[in-house]
Amino acid sequence: MNQYGKSLRVLRGPIANPSASLRTSARVLAALWALLFAAGCSSVVPLAKAPLYDRLGGQAGVARVVDRYVDALASDPRTNRSFDRVNLRRVKDKLALFLCSSTGGRCTYDDDDMKTVHAGMNIREAEFYAGVELLVNILNDEHVAAREKNELLAILAPAKNDVVTR
């Protein structure tokens, strides 16, 4: 009997042993957390979509694509006339900076716009599309996913009006 004149019942189970109760609660919470975390990880919608620049491989990925692209433009007979007597390293550096800035990288492109850069080059539509073909082939070789390819091409497409002058 207790001080109130009632008999005490012996409790069995987790409540009878507070440390066991805490361990059980902790295990249940950990299991629920793991399930919620796993469900969140398998979700298709990310909490924050990474910038295209990062999805292209960041500085290293963009530099690799740009190096190959400028080399291809300078050597392909359909496009090489625009690269006579041009400092290819400078073109690569400027294009990499332009792409970094245009695709959400932490860069600022404050050089000439596309119209100014291509003024007087008399680039024809066929040359422009040959350049697009070269870029797509390089992106394919670099295993860039379709979504990222399409996003990049959508960013670059408006430049056609500034690049093609003939």
Image (tube, rainbow, N blue to C red):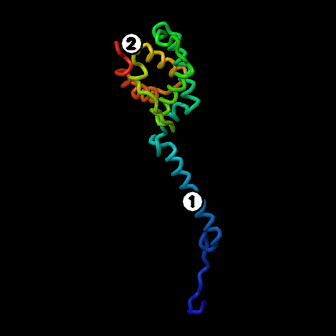
> Residue 2: where, in percent of width, then height?
60, 90
Residue 142 visible in the shown view: no
Dividing the picture into quadrants, the one containing residue 161 is top left
Residue in view at x 40 percent, y 23 percent:
116
> Residue 140: where, in percent of width, then height?
51, 21
Please say if the residues under marks 1 and 2 sit with CB atoms less than 8 Å apart.
no
Q: Residues within 10 Å of mark 2 (few under 14, many from 20)?
A: few
Q: How many numbered tags mark residues here?
A: 2
> Residue 52: where, in percent of width, then height?
48, 34
Residue in view at x 50 percent, y 14 percent:
73
Hey, which residue is sitting farthest top in the picture?
Answer: 77
Residue in view at x 36 percent, y 25 percent:
158
Residue bearing mark 1: 28
Tell me the CA gap for discs 1 and 2: 70 Å
Q: Is residue 67 above or below residue 21?
A: above
- In terms of depth relative to the viewer, which is nearer, 153 or 113? 113
What kind of residue is marked 1?
Val
Q: Is residue 113 above or below residue 31?
A: above
Residue bearing mark 2: 122
Residue 102 visible in the shown view: yes
> Residue 41: where, in percent of width, then height?
52, 44
Q: Quadrant of the C terminus?
A: top left
Q: Is residue 14 left or right of residue 125?
A: right
Q: Is residue 112 left or right of residue 6?
A: left
Q: Say which element carries label 2.
A: loop
Q: Say which element carries label 1.
A: helix
Q: Which mark is residue 126?
A: none
Q: Residues within 10 Å of mark 1 (few under 14, many from 20)?
A: few
Residue in view at x 41 percent, y 14 percent:
121
Is tag 1's residue or tag 2's residue first in the polypeptide sequence?
1
- Looking at the rendered image, the disc whose residue lies closer to the viewer, 1 or 2, is 2
What kind of residue is marked 2?
Asn
